[in-house]
Structure formats: structure tokens, C-alpha cells
Amino acid sequence: MQKRDVYILAGVLVLALCLGIGIFFAETVETGSWGLSFRTEGQPPVGTVHSGVLKGYDAAFLGDTTEKVIYLTFDAGYENGCTEKILDILKKHEVPAAFFLVGNYLEKNADLVRRMVKEGHIVGNHTMHHPDMSKISDLSAFRKELEDLEKLYFDITGQQMPKFYRPPQGTYSESNLQMAKELGYKTVFWSLAYVDWNNDKQPTAEYAFSKLLPRTHNGAVVLLHSTSQTNAAILDELLTRWKEMGYRFGTVEELFG
């Protein structure tokens, strides 16, 4: 074998090794915070963990990318007067949504929770106390965060809580995903969001549209915060514009169908 051939072979082996390492990391779950990389406008982003890997834990961040469908979700740790307007707009547009709520919200806003359920929305589990769940490795402690909220939901609605879970702040670990699955939960991440949670620095409507509309994609799981004054102000127009773009709205049950 000539020296040049040796160099070529070595290069191929190094490339193969690098690709192998890349594939290995792409297909493992490491403790971290959920993140997205948008590479092409109007196309689905790349998530921190590949969709195929998440599927093994009954988790998802993206729906059917062959269909113009949006799955609308809201997170809320407290109520500041925006949710009633948001519910009014959802009812006007006949759009289903999922609200991931914490214990404090249910304790103080039972009437709003009952309204969500009555109007056909999903109330999902965002844990009782909104801790960093990735730091909880004990199954009994993990279960308690979810089951305490389940009990509160049952006391308010008389119904069993739907088994959909969103990790607080998007922090997760492989053991978290596995424990949620063992408890019968589907873990719901997201593929579209923007900085809307800082109530002391709410974005303008123009900024919100500039971040949401160009990144809208087939199968988008949208995360908005129902505490955002901006979201309450733009939601009517936002839903109208998404419909004009040809999108329909699916449910989180459909996301895992």
C-alpha cells in the first residue's frame, strides 16, 4: 500500500469515528435544558434530543411534519389576569389547547381550571412545586410531584388528570423521562417558542410576530406563557394568521396518536 493510500484510509477511519461519535451523542439523553436550533425558515428545528430517541420514552417535541398542523400549549405558574382573555379567544376560534399548570395555579384559580376543562382544553401536569426535576433521581419523590397535582386536579374537577407532563423550565434527564413513562405520562416538549415570560420586559407585538411566524412549521408544538400580556394581546391575530397560512390545530392526544 502506498503512503498516499495510507493517508486516505486513515482519513476515512477518522471521519467514520467522528460520525460514529456524533451519532452516539445524538441518540443518547443527557441531563440538560431543552433547546432548539432553527436552521431553515419555515422548517422544523433540531431539538436537544432526536425525535426518535424521545419516542422511546413516550416523549415528543414535534408532530406530523407532513401536515400543516399546530399543537398549541401554554405554561403557567400563576395567574395575572391574562387567561380569561386567552380562553375567550380560543373559544372564538374553536382552537384546542393544552395548559400545563403547577400546584399554586390550581389552588388559587379553580374556576379557570374548570373552565379550561369545560371548554375542551387539556390541563397537563407541570408538577406541584415547579422544581428542577432533573435533580430528582428518586422515583418516590418524582411521583409525589406529579401525584400531588393529580389529587388537586381531581378535587377541583372530579376527573382524573390527563397524563401529559411538561418538565419545569424544560430541564430533564434520562431517568426523568423513564420515570414519567413508568407513571404512564407522555412528556411534551416544544418546537416553537419565544422570550415571552419576563413580565417586567414584555416584547412588542411586532417582535412576537417576527419570532413566531417565520419559524412556524408543520407539526409545530407551540409553547406560549399565559402570563404574557403580549400573548393575550396578539393571540386573536396570531390564530387568524396561522389559519390564513393553512394550518389547523391539533390536540396533544393527537400528537401521540
Image (cartoon, grey):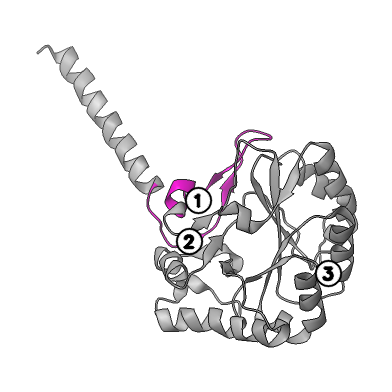
Residue that badge 2 annotates = 32
Q: Position of residue 244 (x, y in %)?
A: 84, 38
Q: Give the vertical position of 86 relative to 117 (above or below).
A: above
Secondary structure under tag 1 reads: loop
Residue that badge 3 annotates = 83
Q: Residue at x 68, y 39 (%)?
A: 217
Sequence-wise, the earlier of marks 2 and 1 is: 2
Q: Is residue 58 left or right of residue 70?
A: left
Q: Residue at x 78, y 36 (%)?
A: 246
Q: Residue at x 23, y 29 (%)?
A: 13
Secondary structure under tag 3 reads: helix
Q: Position of residue 64 (x, y in %)?
A: 60, 42
Secondary structure under tag 2 reads: strand
Residue furthest left as drawn: 1
The residue segment tinted magenta is 27-54
Q: Amino acid at mark 1?
A: Thr
Q: Residue at x 12, y 11 (%)?
A: 2
Sequence-wise, the earlier of marks 3 and 1 is: 1
Q: Give the vertical position of 46 relative to 12 (above or below).
A: below
Asked whether the residues under the numbered discs 2 and 1 touch, taking CB atoms below 8 Å apart as contact, a structural biologist would say yes
Residue 48 numbered tag: 1
